[in-house]
Amino acid sequence: MEKTAVDPTANVPTRRWHALLICLVAGFMTLLDVSIVNVALPSMEHSLRMSASQVSWAVAGYALTFGLTLVPAGRLGDEYGRRKLFLIGLTLFAVTALICGAAPNATVLVIGRLSRGVAAGLLAPQVIGLLQQMYSGPQRGKAFGYYGATVGLSTAIGPLLGGVILQAFGVAQGWRFVFYLSVPVIVVTLAFAFRVLPADRPSGVHRRLDLIGALLLGLGVLAIMLPLLEATGAKSRPQLWLVAVGIVWLVLFVLWERRLGARGGQPLVNLKLLTVRGFAVGTMVAAAFYSGFTGIFLVITMFFQQGLKYSALQAALSTLIFTVGSAGSAVISGRRVHRTGRRSVVAGSAVATLGLAVVAILAGTWTGPDTALVLAVPLLVAGCGCGFVISANQTLTLHEITRADAGVAAGVYETGQRIGTALGTALAGALFFGTLAQTHGDYRTAAGLGLAAPAVLVGVAFLISLVDILRPVRGPAAAVAAQAAG
């Protein structure tokens, strides 16, 4: 059972609400940066005369360093204080925004994006760790429900916000304001964070950071993510052999962590986390689900803008219905998860799969007018399903994790999300661009096949959840599972 720790925000609901709001804003900003830059790429490319490789790294570099930093940052937060790491990460996030916005050439921009990914990787595990620390029971479910709504909003609203900024400040230099306008928000968030976040409580035990484990994990994640990120280009030829190399590095990482733990050391990742069924299943569901959930936006954006000749703003507005459905259902799911348990994840992923499948079919076959209007209803259905999965799965995944391991568990969970995001975007993009080349510009067929991949991947998340809920729970974990399932 989890040992309850006294939290200074526990008996001050207003202060805890303010801390939750700060965490949500910080999480929103880090995830927004994944999607908002996509719509500004043509402006960046023209302004800085970027090569195709530099454009790729401006996008992929952020996701790459984000994914590499998560687990070590989670462990650092657990050991040295989540508030401290939160403030450092948020400060670095503001500084890197200025570097990117003022970049005089492509090289500086890429370096800024890489550094920005590190800042986001420092920050993200602390957000989840703080929510885990401040809340328990049904209140934790509600908090993660709000966090799930934030994830849905940040992922889908990025292109919309980017389109508005480019229209307001002009295509030539508007991309700089995509970065600049985030700075005041971050500064205000930072100022309030100093006041309302719970103080760090020293453990009194100095533990050495597992540098060898961090290196092995970093090499493994790097080798797996690089070819996936390279595959997002239309003409790229990713070196898939690196995936096998990455798996070898991860096996070595597990062996090292096991050996270090057996010798009484402090491993980077407590491997007992992976023996917690809810955590292991939830992390697999997240990886599969995010590979589909985030893969749809690249294809839909390209289909609307290039195939249907929508403006960036019009294309973004066409997907707003997905955002509304996702955000609303995430809040509802977070409030009900302690009564419905993993049934919310099963039902949500089933609904999302159905909605995405209909979107793929209609995008590939509908030849009449008002395509965006025709796709609105299935996009709303898919968004509602996604919202139910995001918050419920996060709550259930961390249900049996102690506060002491909350940061590193969040890092492992979000690393699965980042790898899933890279995989899904790569697969959807490869199908879309490949079909486009083979059919000599048939955008409808390309969109249909490109959107079929996310539907299948979300379907995989549904199957994992379904198998888990049908599989009987034995032993001491049965009581916990029964409580979570309601």
Image (spheres, grey):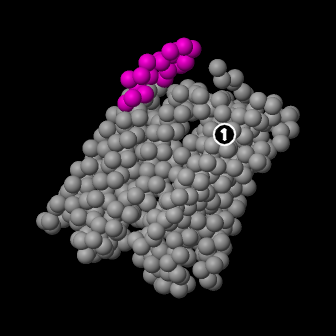
Q: Where residue 225 sits in the image (x, y, percent)?
A: 55, 57
The residue identified by callout 1 is: 254
- In which image quadrant can residue 182 be found? bottom right
Q: Is residue 95 above or below residue 101?
A: above
Q: Nearer the viewer, residue 307 or 331?
A: 307
Q: Quadrant of the N terminus?
A: top right
Residue at far left of view: 368
Q: Quadrant of the C terminus?
A: top left
Q: Where residue 153 sits in the image (x, y, percent)?
A: 44, 53
Q: Is residue 269 above or below residue 477?
A: below
**475 on left or right of 2:** left
As for residue 484 lying within the magenta part, the answer is yes
Q: Where residue 13 sits in the image (x, y, percent)?
A: 61, 34
Which residue type carries mark 1?
Val
Q: Residue at x 37, y 35 (%)?
A: 463
User: In terms of secondary structure, where does tag 1 sit?
Assistant: helix
Q: Nearer the viewer, residue 276 or 376?
A: 276
**236 on left or right of 301:** right
Report if residue 232 is visible in the image: yes
Q: Which residues are magenta?
A: 466-486
As for residue 11 lying within the magenta part, the answer is no
Q: Is residue 395 above or below residue 286?
A: above
The number of numbered discs placed on residues in the rendered structure image is 1
Q: Where residue 198 sits in the image (x, y, percent)?
A: 71, 40
Q: Main secondary structure of the magenta part?
A: helix
Q: Residue at x 55, y 52 (%)?
A: 244
- Mark 1 neighbour density, 10 Å: few (under 14) some (14–19) many (20 or more): some
Q: Nearer the viewer, residue 245 or 426?
A: 245
